[in-house]
Image: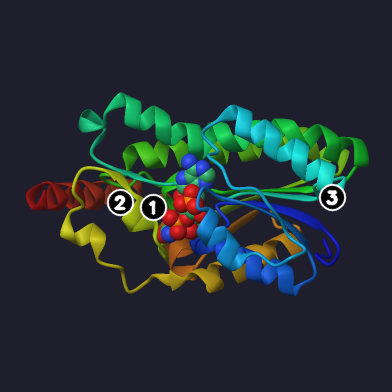
């Protein structure tokens, strides 16, 4: 899809990968709807032609308002990017249920609701793109991030089901699984105090603009899935080829984290 002239709605536009996507899509000529909770950070990123609506995506009423007002402003949404999300650090047996529910509200139910509000209109027009930002953790369950992984696995399943449903109507679904990206993600993670090993950025980490470039290339090419960087693709391949070894490695990693906790 050619980005120029398209109307793109980006959730979590106030920071990290979302803010980098804003830069790239703007440069390529998209018209933008930006949302996130921080009015201040959105104001710093927005340009006069953008439609900016701050608010909490865990609130279903806000989600309905957002889509209604964005449609009122631009008349349509061509690209929906479900990017807002956060993590929860704790083993499953110690993850408070309410914390898990809240995380699922943002990581899974908010994307699903926004899709339900926009996809029927895309279907009617016979075009549109839905981009769901999952994670490598949505393909491989990571220790201490199991419940976050569960929310991102669910987003992967949603994306794949959606693709079968929407492809005949000409609507593209692109699933994105980034590896470690340097953003505010670790600061926004909820749960237990983070073990040192998890708080140190790995040498495989990439910057948000690099991740955004890969996502935009995926949108332009009509990619089904974008896994970035290459080291993340290798990790997933290794996990598929050597499941027992991967499980042993992850169990060792879990024990290491428990010792640091
Ligand atoms: N960084 C990584 O290593 C990595 C790897 C794989 C996948 N991801 C995924 O990439 C996406 C973006 O994360 P990031 O790394 O860019 O993290 P980030 O810098 O923390 O950005 C998260 C964004 O989500 C928004 N957000 C959080 N809670 C919200 C709420 N209740 N309502 C509305 N917006 C909310 C934040 O905006 P406000 O604070 O203004 O609300 C912010 O713009 C997430 O889905 C994350 O799971 C990240």
State yes or no: discs 1 and 3 in contact (Cβ < 8 Å): no
State yes or no: discs 1 and 2 in contact (Cβ < 8 Å): yes
Q: Nearer the viewer, mark 1 or mark 3?
A: 3
Q: Does 58 sit left or right of 82 as displayed?
A: left
CA distance separating discs 1 and 2: 6 Å
Q: Is residue 61 visible?
A: yes
Q: Is residue 24 above or below residue 153?
A: below
* SS at circle 3: helix
Which residue is denoted by mark 3 in the rendering? 74
> Picture coordinates of residue 243 (x, y %)?
35, 47
Q: Residues within 10 Å of mark 2 (few under 14, many from 20)?
A: some
* SS at circle 2: helix
Instruction: Find residue 219 and name its label.
Output: none
Q: Is residue 139 visible?
A: no
Which residue is denoted by mark 2 in the rendering? 246
Q: Earlier in the sequence, mark 1 or mark 3?
A: 3
Q: How is the image coloured?
A: rainbow
Q: Which residue: 56% across, 67% down?
A: 44
Q: Nearer the viewer, residue 250 or 5?
A: 5
> Picture coordinates of residue 83 (x, y %)?
56, 50
> Picture coordinates of residue 244 (x, y %)?
29, 46
Q: Earlier in the sequence, mark 1 or mark 2?
A: 1
Q: Earlier in the sequence, mark 3 or mark 2?
A: 3
Q: Is mark 2 within 8 Å of ligand 1?
A: no
């Amino acid at each position: 899809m050619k980005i120029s002239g398209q109307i793109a709605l980006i959730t979590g536009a106030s920071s990290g990968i979302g803010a980098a996507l804003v830069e790239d899509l703007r440069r390529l000529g998209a018209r933008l709807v930006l949302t996130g909770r921080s009015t201040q950070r959105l104001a710093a990123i927005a340009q006069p032609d953008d439609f900016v609506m701050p608010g909490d995506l865990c609130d279903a009423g806000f989600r309905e308002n957002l889509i209604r007002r964005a449609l009122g402003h631009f008349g349509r949404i061509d690209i929906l990017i479900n990017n807002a999300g956060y993590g929860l650090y704790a083993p499953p047996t110690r993850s408070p249920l309410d914390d898990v529910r809240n995380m699922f509200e943002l990581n899974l139910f908010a994307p699903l609701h926004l899709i339900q509000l926009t996809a029927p209109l895309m279907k009617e027009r016979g075009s549109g793109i839905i981009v769901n930002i999952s994670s490598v953790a949505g393909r491989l369950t990571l220790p201490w991030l199991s419940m976050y992984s569960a929310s991102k696995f669910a987003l992967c399943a949603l994306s794949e089901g959606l693709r079968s449903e929407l492809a005949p109507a000409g609507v593209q679904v692109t699933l994105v699984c980034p590896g470690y990206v340097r953003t505010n993600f670790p600061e926004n993670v909820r749960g237990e105090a983070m073990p040192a090993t998890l708080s140190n950025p790995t040498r495989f980490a990439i910057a948000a603009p690099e991740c955004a470039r890969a996502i935009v290339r995926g949108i332009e090419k009509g990619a089904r899935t974008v896994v970035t960087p290459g080291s993340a693709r290798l990790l997933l391949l290794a996990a598929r080829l050597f499941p027992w070894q991967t499980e042993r490695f992850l169990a060792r990693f879990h024990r290491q984290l428990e010792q640091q906790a």
